Amino acid sequence: MINIREVTETNKMIEQENLDVRTITMGLSLLDCISDNTEKVCENIYKKITSYAGKLVETGEQLEKEFGIPIVNKRVSVTPIASVGGACAKNTNDFVKIAKSMDKAASDIGVNFIGGFSAIVSKGSTKAEDIFMRSIPEALSETEFICSSVNVGSTKTGINMDSVRLMGEIIKETAERTKENDSIGCAKLVVLCNAPDDNPFMAGAFHGISEPEAVIHVGVSGPGVVKYALENKRESDFKELCDTIKKTAFKITRVGQLVSQEAAKRLGAVPGILDLSLAPTPAVGDSVADILKAIGLEQPGAPGTTAALALLNDQVKKGGVMASSYVGGLSGAFIPVSEDQGMIDAVNAGALTIEKLEAMTCVCSVGLDMIAIPGDTPAASISGIIADEAAIGMVNQKTTAVRIIPVAGKTIGDTVEFGGLLGYAPVMPVNTFDCSAFIKREGRIPAPIHSFKN
């Protein structure tokens, strides 16, 4: 049984090592909001969000005070809107209206982000889903809190290359529509393969069809804690190194478990999953890159980086899974560029390229995350990057994603400032050889042979 004494053990981690609960996310089913009238859908969605999640922020702040644990973000995720709005949406404007109603609800209850402006098109897309995807640029340019995601593939279904091609164009249009703010709309848009139903982290969070009416998912963090624990293990062998990471992950996870149970009880929701991911911030000392350095690399990107990241990911999961009955989401280690000061330094030092980051995504939590690229990068090249990541996820039976920002008007060597947890990023070069003949092919890349496990 979890008690406050376990949290007291972690006071030093909280005060000195940047330990926090990165997010409590309320997942809400909007299936009962469906109507063939867009205005009615908007009204239903607003009422559902504000009635169920109206006290989410207040509850999070109460738990922070009672337990002394920083809870950085309070968020909401909902049923994929492409499904909720399919019966009423006749054009992109209908989906934009729904986005605005979600945005108003998020603003009124005070959450950081609301996810679920999403579609699941891993095997194909309906007419409504095509309309939805084309509405994303306008929706993201006219809202503040909306996060959007599209799942284009899975190990079971293969990769929907028609949607991959379209999402390359959507990302370019989103960048152009938000160019006055360094194309920040793209920072709230992610394309996934094997998206989990219970992810509490934005921009990929949505409330899966298999989830209960209302759940509380918690995402813990703590890269600073792991880095600090490894500082005195510079000469240790791999066994001691792994044991240290596992023990640290166990302690971090117990904090999240307590918050999950208490938040769900007070909000009348079901406790959901605990996401064990080490999620960095731009703050110095809160970096996954610094953990890799503590393991023995001069810079992330050096030979051995993928092996070190694989070790870290595996030990975090092994330690964390012992501390919680329900582990889920993404769980592992995020390697965003703009949100991790150590990753930014590695890019600026020339140690880290997009190609090396892609290799690292084979063993990390997600994929190519928060990477700024030149604004004139062709849509086909962006689609090619999405296809590569989706293939890694499909073949390796893991979640992969692309959150990439072709910053309008910026080129290699420029720096882009997103602010807050999104941080800042150097604009990275992209391979300029053409892949458009591949991307313009229609249809679906079939699922791999090992997908047949029924």
Image: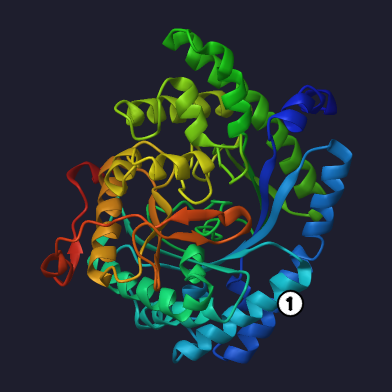
Amino acid type, callout 1: Lys
In this rendered view, identify the residue nearer to me: 427 or 322: 427
Colour setup of the view:
rainbow
Is residue 335 visible to the viewer in this orientation of the structure?
no
Q: Which image quarter holds the C terminus?
A: top left
- Going by the image, does 14 lie left or right of 444? right
Within 10 Å of disc 1 (Cα), the crowding (few <14, some 14-19, many 20+) is some
Q: Residue furthest left?
A: 437
Q: Relative to 66, does residue 145 appear above or below in the rendering?
A: below
Q: Residue at x 21, y 56 (%)?
A: 431
> Label 1, on which residue?
47
Q: Can residue 27 be seen by looking at this rendering?
A: yes
Instruction: Please state the total of marks drawn on the protein image.
Output: 1
Left/right placement of residue 291 relative to residue 271 reads left
Which one is nearer the viewer's eye here, 361 or 236? 236
- Provide the secondary structure element on which disc 1 rests: helix
Q: Is residue 89 above or below residue 206?
A: below
Q: Residue at x 63, y 28 (%)?
A: 225
From the top left corner, tell me how far across and down residue 209 is, in percent: 52, 61
User: What residue do we see at 11% from left, 69% from top?
Assistant: 437
Which quadrant would the N terminus be assigned to in this image? Answer: top right
Left or right side of 23 for 347: left
Q: Residue at x 46, y 41 (%)?
A: 345
Percent coordinates x, y for residue 102 in the rendering: 64, 75
Observer-nearest of 89 and 367? 367
Please indicate whether residue 442 sits to the left or right of residue 215 in the image: left
User: What is the x, y in percent for residue 412?
Assistant: 34, 59
